[in-house]
């Protein structure tokens, strides 16, 4: 064997050895490189923890396949790439994309089945060079694991937004939506929520949509404070078994014993979500011949407790120029009655400005007869989650609320230095008992005058959690306003509140992820419709041809000598 052959053989053996070593390392060490600027394909530690829980086959069926509008093809692509990222970390996850409209003969049956499961389609108007057509899209996925099934919404509703804006917002929430869905079916329920009753709180049917949604992730049960009068200690011990207490629009005064039970529940680590109206005012009471009602303060006997925790809900109404639409009859009554849409300023339409994960990237949230919140200095960290617009002000009570106010004219001067009133506040820290250095309403050996680290959320409107009823007295979607046809983000906000208060694996923090999604400007594409293909397709071919010609010319010149 010649020296050159020996060198060649040695080189080949070295290369083979390197390849084998690299393959061995690659099979034992797993890593994926995300070269995107915003790291959109880098799963959060929470998502990795959730996918690690999958021990058996988990099947995800995505109903976005076929001839989709351009915006939804982007959502389809992002969904597929994200699911591939999940699958790369756990091969038990299997997914497929399905076109429910592929088979025309069976499409109606498929649509009915999807409707039955709660998967409602989106009708999109497709504008292609001025030609408009309608397309039906099901932006949903269904995950199945161990005989459990959960719906995963892929398109986020953003009121008033274009389809492109909705897709951008949906991609922002994609990892959160998928991770939350997988968490529901892979993780056993552990946390428990008590829905407080006994003080005129909302009936279950009026917050049915919220309760049904929460029930997918947590145990939930009613807890009546009436038992406090007979055996307050037993009631307190029973309440301590729950992780969160939901107090939704109480209308009757709390006794001192009931307040001590709630206070000590908080001192012992119980989370609370308060939805409180400090003013008596209902929309239904306005629909009378006079079109007016009297709004007056409501005494719940909670002011001293709230003051001790570091906030105060004032018995005022908020009047906001950024109100919600309302339709009222105008002209002559009878068969010729016409309805006109007005701006109802006592129903603020709030768009979050905070970057807190609870409200980040949420759309409009509808309030009804909301009250302003004051925050007080007491060492508790306070984060304003929602506030009224710049053009809003307080209206003292008692006062008359009249439907005729929709016609009044206002100017920015009427709201100078009066707006941006807090409507929802997150409080975090070690709360001090309102009964510290005071006589207790009932004797308690386990009394704590200072609690451990805790958190609560206060919302100054009990109607925020209230779903409307249809003509058959069945609950409609929470946040859907039948009077205007608008769907607000009330449910998403409340679910985020619950998740933040009870979240022990950081699921809510996935919402903090920011993605940069550059999309084509359709107007510019239409304006340059003939030149765009030349630039995107023809120019690269021309450049490649010039490079080939020059390369061939240089090569011939070099070797022809």
Image (cartoon, rainbow, N blue to C red):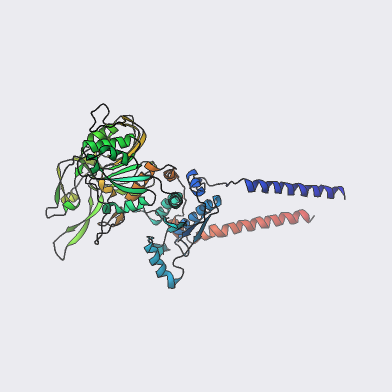
In percent of width and height, residue 381 lies at 35, 33
| Vertical position of residue 475 compared to residue 371: above or below | below
Relative image position of residue 293 (x, y in whole percent) = 14, 48
Instruction: Give the percent coordinates (x, y) of residue 165.
Output: 40, 53
- Quarter location, residue 148: bottom left
Q: Nearer the viewer, residue 303 or 15?
A: 303
- What's the residue at 28%, 51% (across, down)? 207
Q: Quadrant of the C terminus?
A: bottom right
Q: Can residue 489 be seen in this view?
A: no
Q: Is residue 81 left or right of residue 264?
A: right
- Judging depth in this view, the residue of 265 and 170 nearest the camera is 265
Picture layout, residue 173 above or below residue 330: above
Of residues 556 and 422, the one nearer the viewer is 422
**In the current view of this chain or complex, which residue is farthest to the bottom?**
105
Question: Which picture quadrant has residue 377?
Answer: top left
Q: Position of residue 483 (x, y in %)?
A: 24, 57
| Residue 52 shows up from this direction | yes
In which image quadrant can residue 454 be found?
top left
Q: Nearer the viewer, residue 315 or 348?
A: 315
Q: Residue furthest right?
A: 1
Label total for image: 0
Q: At 62% across and 45% down in the image, what residue appears?
A: 29
Given the current orientation, which residue lies at the most extreme top position? 437
In this rendering, position of residue 88 left or right of residue 395: right
């Amino acid at each position: 064997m010649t020296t050159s052959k020996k060198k060649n053989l040695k080189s080949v053996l070295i290369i083979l050895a390197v390849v084998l070593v690299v393959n061995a390392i690659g099979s034992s060490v797993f890593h994926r490189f995300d070269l995107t600027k915003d790291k959109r394909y880098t799963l959060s530690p929470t998502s990795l923890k959730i996918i690690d829980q999958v021990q058996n086959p988990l099947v995800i069926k995505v109903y976005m396949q076929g001839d989709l509008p351009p915006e939804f093809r982007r959502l389809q692509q992002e969904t597929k790439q994200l699911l591939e990222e999940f699958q790369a970390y756990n091969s038990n996850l299997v997914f497929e994309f399905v076109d429910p409209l592929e088979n025309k003969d069976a499409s109606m049956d498929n649509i009915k089945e999807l409707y039955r499961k709660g998967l409602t389609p989106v009708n999109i108007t497709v504008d292609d060079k001025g030609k408009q057509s309608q397309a039906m899209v099901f932006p949903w996925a269904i995950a199945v694991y161990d005989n459990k099934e959960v719906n995963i919404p892929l398109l986020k509703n953003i009121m008033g937004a274009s389809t492109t804006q909705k897709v951008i917002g949906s991609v922002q929430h994609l990892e959160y939506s998928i991770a939350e869905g997988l968490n529901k079916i892979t993780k056993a329920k552990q946390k428990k929520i008590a829905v407080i009753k006994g003080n005129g709180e909302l009936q279950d049917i009026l917050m049915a949509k919220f309760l049904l949604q929460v029930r997918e992730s947590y145990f939930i049960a009613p807890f009546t404070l009436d038992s406090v009068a007979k055996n307050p200690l037993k009631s307190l011990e029973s309440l301590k078994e729950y992780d969160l207490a939901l107090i939704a629009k109480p209308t009757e005064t709390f006794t001192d014993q009931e307040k001590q039970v709630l206070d000590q529940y908080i001192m012992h680590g119980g989370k609370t979500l308060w939805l409180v109206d400090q003013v008596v005012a209902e929309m239904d009471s306005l629909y009378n011949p006079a079109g007016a009602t009297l709004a007056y303060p409501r005494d719940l006997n909670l002011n001293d407790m709230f003051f001790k925790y570091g906030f105060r809900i004032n018995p005022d109404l908020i009047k906001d120029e950024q109100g919600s639409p309302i339709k009222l009859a105008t002209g002559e009554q009878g068969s010729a009655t016409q309805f006109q849409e007005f701006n109802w300023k006592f129903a603020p339409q709030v768009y979050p400005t905070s970057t807190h994960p609870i409200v980040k990237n949420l759309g409009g949230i509808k309030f009804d007869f909301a009250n302003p919140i004051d925050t007080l200095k007491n060492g508790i960290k306070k984060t304003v989650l929602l506030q009224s617009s710049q053009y809003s002000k307080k209206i003292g009570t008692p006062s008359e609320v009249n439907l005729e106010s929709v016609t009044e004219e206002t100017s920015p001067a009427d709201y100078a230095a009066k707006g941006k009133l807090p409507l929802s506040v997150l409080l975090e820290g070690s709360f001090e008992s309102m009964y510290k250095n005071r006589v207790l309403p009932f004797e308690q050996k386990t009394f704590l005058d200072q609690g451990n680290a805790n958190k609560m959320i206060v919302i100054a409107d009990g109607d925020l959690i209230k779903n409307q009823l249809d003509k058959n007295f069945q609950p409609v979607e929470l946040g859907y306003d039948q009077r205007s046809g608008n769907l607000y983000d009330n449910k998403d906000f409340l679910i985020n509140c619950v998740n933040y208060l009870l979240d022990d694996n950081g699921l809510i923090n996935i919402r903090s992820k920011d993605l940069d999604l550059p999309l084509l400007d359709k107007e510019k594409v239409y304006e340059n419709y003939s030149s765009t293909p030349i630039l995107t397709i023809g120019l690269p071919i021309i450049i490649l041809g010039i490079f080939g010609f020059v390369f061939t010319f240089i090569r011939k010149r070099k070797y022809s000598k």
